[in-house]
């Protein structure tokens, strides 16, 4: 078998020289004559290469070398596939942003529009929850203590704003009524102002809770002390 290499040159339309490498195979045997299939592939620089057919090339390639090349191509394909998966996952993670109000993920383009509406709904729901909790606590809790202070002269309840005004008027009225009483029932001293100690207040609280009044507190003890003082300072108005 004899191999003859020829090189042909042509002048192209663009003024460049095009080289054509042709590998011809001639068989001198009279029984068999085979001609290789020539595949011409053009390139941008004007060169044209002739490639042999893959079937003819496999006759001159070692089996082990072909196996190694196939394994290398398979490994490169696996690396490209893995890299593409990692890139896709990273890109997807970067495009999704966490909403701090509803705990959901949204795209960066739609997050701003979503948060404007989600924030309003979140604040409205929060206010509704707070109002409902206050209402439930009001229903389940004990009755609140009435405001104000009990007067130790007449026994009426008055608020803190009007307490000083009432005390002065109530004391003057008590003095006037006391002067109208007969001498034998007239009081010789002014009404006594109660000044309970902390120990007395705590004793009252413990005694009331021992008797079953579990909601008895300090304000209740002070009210009882002031009411008992008003009973002691009461005038016998039936003699007037």
Image (cartoon, rainbow, N blue to C red):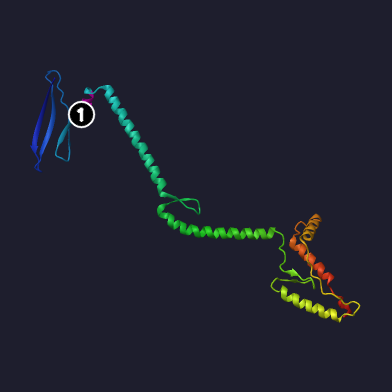
Q: Nearer the viewer, residue 114 or 189?
A: 189
Residue 56 painted magenta: yes
**171 above or below 207?**
below
Majority secondary structure of magenta residues = helix
Identify which residue is drawn at 60% across, 59% down. 130
Q: Looking at the picture, how far across and down is residue 34, in whole percent?
A: 16, 23
Magenta-highlighted residues: 54-58
216 left or right of 188 in image: left
Identify which residue is drawn at 32% across, 28% down. 71
Name which quarter of the figure residue 91 lies in.
top left
Q: Looking at the picture, how far across and down is residue 147, in whole percent?
A: 71, 67
**Residue neighbourhood size for the residue with mark 1, other residues' Cα within 10 Å, grouped as few (<14), some (14–19), many (≥20):** few
Helix, strand or loop at disc 1? Answer: loop
Name which quarter of the figure residue 83 lies in.
top left
Quadrant, the N terminus: top left
Identify which residue is drawn at 33% across, 31% down. 75
**10 above or below 115?**
above
57 left or right of 91 in image: left
Q: Which residue is mark 1?
A: 53
Q: Looking at the picture, how far across and down is residue 216, in whole percent?
A: 76, 59
């Amino acid at each position: 078998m004899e191999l003859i290499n020829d090189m042909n040159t042509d002048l192209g339309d663009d003024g460049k020289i095009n080289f054509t490498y042709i590998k011809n195979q001639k068989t001198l045997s009279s029984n068999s004559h085979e001609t290789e299939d020539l595949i011409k592939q053009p390139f941008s620089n004007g060169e044209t290469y002739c490639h042999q057919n893959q079937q003819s090339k496999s006759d001159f390639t070692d089996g082990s070398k072909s196996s190694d090349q196939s394994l290398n191509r398979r490994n490169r394909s696996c690396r490209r596939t893995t890299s593409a998966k990692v890139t896709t996952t990273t890109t997807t993670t970067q495009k999704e942003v966490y909403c701090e109000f509803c705990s959901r993920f949204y795209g960066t383009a739609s997050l701003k529009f979503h948060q404007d509406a989600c924030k309003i709904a979140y604040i409205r729901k929060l206010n509704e929850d707070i109002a409902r909790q206050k209402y439930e606590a009001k229903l389940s809790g004990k009755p609140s203590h009435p405001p104000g202070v009990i007067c130790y002269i007449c026994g009426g309840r008055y608020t803190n704003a009007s307490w000083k005004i009432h005390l002065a008027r109530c004391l003057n009225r008590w003095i006037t009524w006391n002067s109208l009483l007969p001498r034998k029932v007239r009081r010789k001293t002014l009404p006594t102002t109660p000044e309970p100690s902390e120990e007395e207040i705590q004793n009252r609280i413990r005694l009331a809770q021992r008797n079953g009044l579990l909601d008895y507190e300090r304000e209740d003890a002070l009210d009882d002390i002031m009411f008992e003082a008003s009973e002691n300072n009461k005038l016998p108005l039936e003699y007037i």
